[in-house]
Amino acid sequence: MSSPHPQGLRTRAEQLLRAGHPVKEVARQLGIPVQTVYRWRRSGAPASDLARARARIDELEREVLLCRDVIATMRQLMPPKDGTR
């Protein structure tokens, strides 16, 4: 299905949205329906960017779990010197 709007228009809309302009203002400035801007915004992030972000999140979650395991092990091997810490 081909879009009735030129690619440059979508690019400009995405730039305005990234700059923090509200959807309604972007639609008004570009002369396109608000729903079109919402649809473009929803599908704006390329799949590869999302995949990289999810992979990084998974990596960080594994790192947090590893740090928690290390802390628990250290507490067992070397308890704090006094009970106030």
Image (cartoon, rainbow, N blue to C red):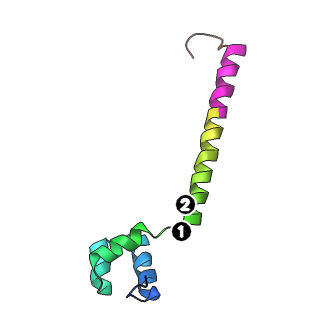
Tell me if residue 18 can be seen: yes
Q: Which percent across, then down, holds residue 23?
A: 31, 72
Please tell me which residue is depicted at 53% across the width and 68% down the height of the picture.
46
Q: Quadrant of residue 9?
A: bottom left
Residue 70 vertical position relative to residue 55 in the rendered view, above or below: above
Q: Which residues are magenta?
A: 66-78
- Across the whole image, how many numbered discs are drawn on residues? 2
Q: Circle 1 — which element?
A: loop
Q: Circle 1 is placed at which residue position?
A: 46
- Residue 72, labelled with which disc? none
Q: Main secondary structure of the magenta part?
A: helix
Q: Is residue 67 magenta?
A: yes
51, 77: nearer the viewer: 51
Residue to which mark 2 is pinned = 50
Q: Is residue 5 above or below residue 25?
A: below
Which quarter of the image is occupied by the N terminus? bottom left
Residue situated furthest right in the rendering: 77
Q: Nearer the viewer, residue 75 or 13?
A: 13
How many C-alpha atoms fall within 10 Å of the one at disc 1: few (<14), some, or many (≥20)? few
Please provide percent x and percent y for residue 44: 46, 70
Q: Is residue 78 visible?
A: no
Q: Position of residue 55 (x, y in %)?
A: 62, 52
Q: Give yes or no for contact between labels 2 and 1 (Cβ–Cβ under 8 Å).
A: yes
